[in-house]
Amino acid sequence: MLSAVLRSPTAIEVSIKIMDAFVEMRHFIADNAHMFEQIRNIELKQAEYQKATDDRFEKVFDYMGAHREPRQKVFFEGQVWDAFEFLVSTIQKAQKGIVLVDGYVDTTTLNILAKKAEGVVVTVWTNPKTKLTARDVETFNAQYPSLEVRHTTAFHDRFLILDGSEGYLVGASLKDAGKRSFAVTRIEDAAIAQTVLSKLDGIELPGN
């Protein structure tokens, strides 16, 4: 019965069409061999370009990993924007907490601290005679929580400490950055930053 089906006119016609399709396909491939070769060459060039691009990125990443930011950054009088931009970029590195020791802070200082990442807690140690008011702190916390201001006269220099370990010695109050020449020096030894924090923790606050 199967033999009769395979030998039927319909089966023969289908077989002929299949054979014709294969013949046409072979003719198409033969006639367009040059085009297929060009496509293949393009794919090879794309693969080579991709590999070269990947290699370049690897070199860039290796360079970035091997070259840390400068230990010291100097800003000269008039470089107000450059100093502001640098301080903001430094503030934004903090992931958990920022401690600023600066005897003279005002709303300009808060403008820099407002650029911090969301959720980062800020503690500012400043002179009791600072121009920063309780209302300023309250307004800041309404949008950029949380900021706490404490007072001390125990420090002459200005320190900026990120996440309890990354410390910077800042040569000018943040509010005056760029108005006169000053330098920012990264503290290489994390233990020094932690010592500064421990000294701050040991300061007896008014009312205690």
Image (tube, rainbow, N blue to C red):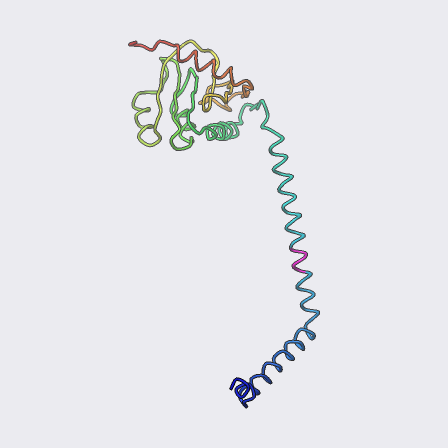
Residue at x 30% of width, y 9% of height: 208
- x and y percentages locating residue 66 in the rendered image: 63, 31
In the rendered view, tell whether residue 38 sits above or below residue 48: below
Magenta region includes residue 19: no
- Relative to 207, 5 lies left or right: right
Horizontal side of 64 relative to 196 (left or right) equals right
Residue 77 image offset from top left, x and y in percent: 54, 23
- Which is nearer the eye, 172 or 153? 153
Which of these two is toward me, 76 or 48?
48
Task: Establish if 19 lies above or below 81.
Answer: below
* Residue found farthest to the front: 1
Q: Residue at x 33, y 11 (%)?
A: 205
Kindly give the residue lying farthest to the bottom in the view shown.
Answer: 9
Magenta region, main secondary structure: helix
Q: Looking at the image, which residue is at 39% across and 33% down? A: 118
Looking at the rendered structure, the number of numbered marks drawn on it comes to 0
Q: Quadrant of residue 110?
A: top left
32 w.r.t. 179: above or below = below
Q: Which residues are magenta?
A: 42-46
Residue toward you, 65 or 200: 65
Image coordinates of residue 42 in percent, x first then y, are 66, 60
Q: Residue at x 63, y 76 (%)?
A: 25
Image location (x, y in percent) of residue 88: 47, 29
